[in-house]
Amino acid sequence: MSDPDGPRTEWMNAAADVLRGLNADEEPAALLRRVARHTCALTGVDSCAVMLLDETGTRLVTRASHGLTEAYRHDLDSLAPMLVHPTAHAPDVPAAQAVRERRTVVLSDVDGLGEDSPWRAAAGREGIHSILAVPLDADDGCAGVLVGYTRRAHRFAASELALAELMAQYVATVLRAARVKEVQRSTIAQLEKTNAELTTAVESLHHERAQREWAEAQDRRLVALLLDDAGLDGVLDALADALAATVVLESAEDGTVLARSADAAAGRERPAATAALPLGRELGTLGPGSSPVRLELGNAHAWVLALAVAGEAVARLWVIRDRDAGAGAPPLVRSVIERFAPLVALELHKRRHAADAALRLTRDLAVDLVSGGGRDRDLRDRARALGHDLTRPHTVVLVPAGAAATRSARAARQAFGDAALVGEDAGSLVVLVPDADRAALVAAAAALPDGPTVVGATVTGTEDYPAAWRVVRTAAALAAAGPRRAGPVVDLDDLGVAALLLESGAPDGLRRLADRTLGPLERHDAQRSTDLVGTLRAWLDAGGATAEAARALHVHPHTVGYRLRRAGELTGLDLQRADAVFELRVAMMVRAVQRAAGHP
């Protein structure tokens, strides 16, 4: 005799099993598979699928199944979107109809899906004959559908439909409970997080109080430094000691180091990470008024801050600490740097002001020496007051000032040393270098950005500076007006005959030679608008190679040959003879010196 309570018992067992999965925090997919399995057992279907609405609420997606092949599961989600509200040309299915109408739908024969339905053929391949679709309906809406499939014609009894609908309602309730439980877990996690944040906040308040007390001690230290007039080096040392760090002050213009803390004097080694520190090159433009920027440099931490004087960024302050010293890092590093920054800027301004005054005096001395202004005794006394000894031999050097004379002067001091006297005269820098090794001097001049630099004579007496300066100025003009671009350095010791002409100013005999040799060509060029002198100069520069001279002049070699024959006719010189070529070279050199010296 059958048990009349059998179906109810089976349903209660199924419900209890699903509840156990829910309480055990089972994954949603596993929980839904339990539902599909129990649905098959309760309703007599051969297979079952649980479909839920996607995030948009317009499409059904298979979330779990029991008894279905992987191929059919794939077909359910890939053949076509299973729309709850299909368009006029889109196929409809029992699952979508059940959700849309929120009622149980039974399809006794899959042939009812229609010949154009993509799921009819898939159902045939799966061996499905009948379909039962029950909406997962609850008070807060419909979450999806429970779908059962049979492989034979099946007429669902009222008890089977009732059990299926009861299971669907229970599943909807379970899904809602799962969502509530997830909200509870999220709330508990948020409460735990809030409690941890409160604990951290309390600890932070105690920590901040200790930091403020420490910062106030640094403020008292700053006042003491200001009252004691500690100077730039003293302020940098105090900052390095306060932060257990190395402090470097660099120029904002070119990154050169202006000052640094005395780590050795403080009993510490300079951090190895700062030995190859890319000061400034990794930062781009760091504007004044910004907060310290933190950088990671190999095995060191660094903070860098722009310093401004009169609203202009003049320097960058670097604070560097070894990464190994991180455990003992003092608090409020940025705050301490910002507190020290105004005092560093003040001391830097004082130092720059004193240095500028000394540079002005040095510049005036250099210009007076080469211009012949002032008595010998006065010049020597002024030099001695500035720490310079004019009894030492000085080499006279001319450096083009370039677009920025101040920057060129700074580059010249860096190249030739702080002992050099640097001034500016008629758009060029006067550099007087004491006790210079000429080879080293030429090498240093070659590294300057603007050229060519002219290295002139080495003089000792104050009366010799004006003549030496006139020679280097003439040599610079000669190099600038020459047919070929000069190199980075013009050394008068390498000019040979040209150097003698520069010193003597081209004697009368040589001037007459140039007038006699080049005069006819110059008059012909002026009257006929030709370029015989220029062609002859290019030919001489090319070593007598007609083709190379033609390339330099951008004309045909035949044109160069014609002009050379015409030049020979006008000068009466045979350009095939070595003595004639030498005479032309001397004449050209005399003319170049005359032009460079400003003579017509």
Image (spheres, rainbow, N blue to C red):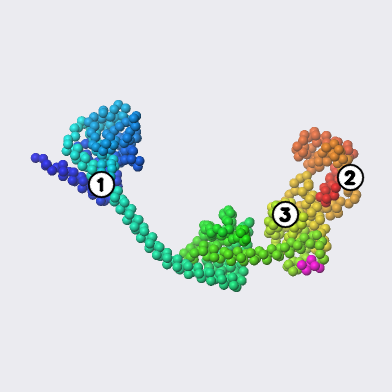
Looking at the picture, which amino acid does disc 1 mark?
A: Val
Looking at the picture, which amino acid does disc 2 mark?
A: Asp
Decide which of 422, 217 is in the foreground and name it: 217
Q: Position of residue 503 (x, y in %)?
A: 84, 55
Please indicate whether residue 173 sits to the left or right of residue 355 in the image. Answer: left
* Disc 3 packing (10 Å; few <14; some 14–19; many ≥20): many
Under circle 3, the secondary element is loop
User: Spatial distance from mark 2 to mark 1, Cα to Cα?
Assistant: 115 Å
Please indicate whether residue 353 sits to the left or right of residue 239 in the image. Answer: right
Q: Which residue is mark 3?
A: 401
Name the disc covering residue 174, or none.
1
Q: Residue at x 83, y 53 (%)?
A: 502
- Regarding residue 204, the answer to whether it shows in the image is yes
Q: Position of residue 187 (x, y in %)?
A: 33, 54
Under circle 2, the secondary element is helix
Q: Determine the main secondary structure of the stretch shown in magenta.
A: helix
Q: Which residue is mark 2?
A: 515
Which range of residues does the magenta coloring cover? 377-382
